[in-house]
Amino acid sequence: MAEAGRRSDSESSNSPHLTDATVWLRLCLVAGLGGAALRRLLTQFGTPQEALDARLSALESAIGRDTAAAIKRGPDPQRLDAALAWLRQPGHRLLTLADDEYPQSLLQTADPPVVLYVRGRLDLLQHPALAVVGSRNPTPGGLADAEAFAEALSHAGLTIVSGLALGIDAAAHRGGLRGPSSTIAVLGTGLDRVYPARHRDLAHEIAQHGLLISEFALGTPAIASNFPRRNRIISGLARGCLVVEAALHSGSLITAKQALEQGRDVFAIPGSIHSPLAKGCHWLIKQGAKLVESAQDVLEELDPGTVSSVEAKAQAPLPVSVEEAAMLAVAGFAPVDLDTICIRGGLTPDAASAMLLKLELEGYMSRLPGGLFQRLR
């Protein structure tokens, strides 16, 4: 593809990828030019270069006078130079609708991004994937479920896609990273920013061993309206969407709805009827989402008869003593207080507290606010 206009002074690379990226960026970085208008221009003119070279009158008929004038003025030179400098760094790419590496699953959705900024393992975009989403304020059990499901599914060949948010998203990414199929984080900001800031180390690990991806230009801050928009990419990259914990009216339900609209399978993990964070999952199940209790349930639904079992390890006897196993059975899986445990198990408070502390240190129990305990596995 020919290069649009004169190259900026900072462009010194002869890389064909960078040359092509320059043309796309000269169009996509024009202020006020959104995805729908960009696709309309590409449909009418064929390529970004031809749109840039088009007469003003032809542009005005396609997208209006103000936007056409903005195209003729061109993008902010500083934004363009900053984007090109970012693209020169190892592992950084700009994927466009014209690139072979552009994920086909996303290309087949109703609103595919015209360009994607990516950093990391580009090959993951060609892997079968599963979106894993949920609450930003999950229970300890929800975190454990998200991480365990993601790890098992990553070992089974599914790349885990999520949004780098607090809570379930972060747990899903951590689980995915522990398997060979790794994880993809779809950001609601530019790739030169990390939101929330506390996930900077996690984002760095994903950049090294997985993939970071965003449709938003470099420098784009955390704007509330951008996060629901990026959810269509999370679901669009995946074959299905697993909701771990979600309240009613949560952002995770937006992702699940978009997955349904894109023809993807939706899965939900049930929870306690008393938990607000189970209400969203239960609502999804009532609407037809698949109730899942194990990673194997997801695999069999996505590819029945061809997936290998990942349940043998999960179904193996717990490496605990008889007394500890009895304590776990007494505790159940719903949050419970010390007095109830003592009554159920016929234990003294000191004996029960000592056993609970040991199980907590071993990762089988979690201490919740209000003096409650919950079994994790």
Image: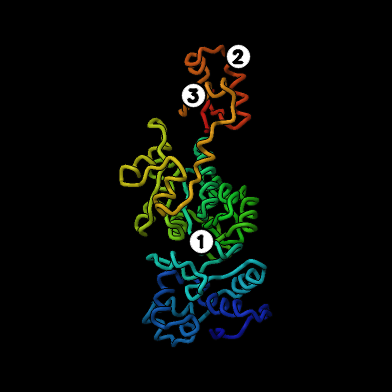
Q: State whether residue 69 is above or below residue 239.
A: below
The spot of residue 186 in percent (x, y) is 52, 57
Residue 143 seen in the current view: no
Label 1 crowd (10 A; few <14 / some 14-19 / many >=20):
some
Please state which amino acid type lies under the numbered disc 1. Answer: His
The spot of residue 295 in percent (x, y) is 47, 45
Q: CA distance from mark 2 to mark 1?
A: 52 Å
Please state which amino acid type lies under the numbered disc 2. Answer: Asp
Say which residue appears at 35% left-offset and 58% top-offset.
Answer: 263
Q: State whether residue 343 is above or below residue 357.
A: above
- Contact between labelled residues 2 and 3, with CB atoms less than 8 Å apart: no
Mark 2 or mark 1, whichever is nearer to me: 1
Q: State whether residue 358 is above or below residue 23.
A: above
Label 3: which secondary element: helix
Say which residue appears at 59% left-offset and 19% top-offset.
Answer: 353
Left or right of 197 in this view: 281: left
Say which residue appears at 54% left-offset and 28% top-offset.
Answer: 368
Residue 166 image-quadrant placement: top right
Residue 119 seen in the current view: yes
Label 2 crowd (10 A; few <14 / some 14-19 / many >=20):
few
Image disc number at residue 350: 2
Q: What colour scheme has been applied to the protein in the rendered image?
A: rainbow
Label 1: which secondary element: loop
Q: Which residue is mark 1?
A: 127
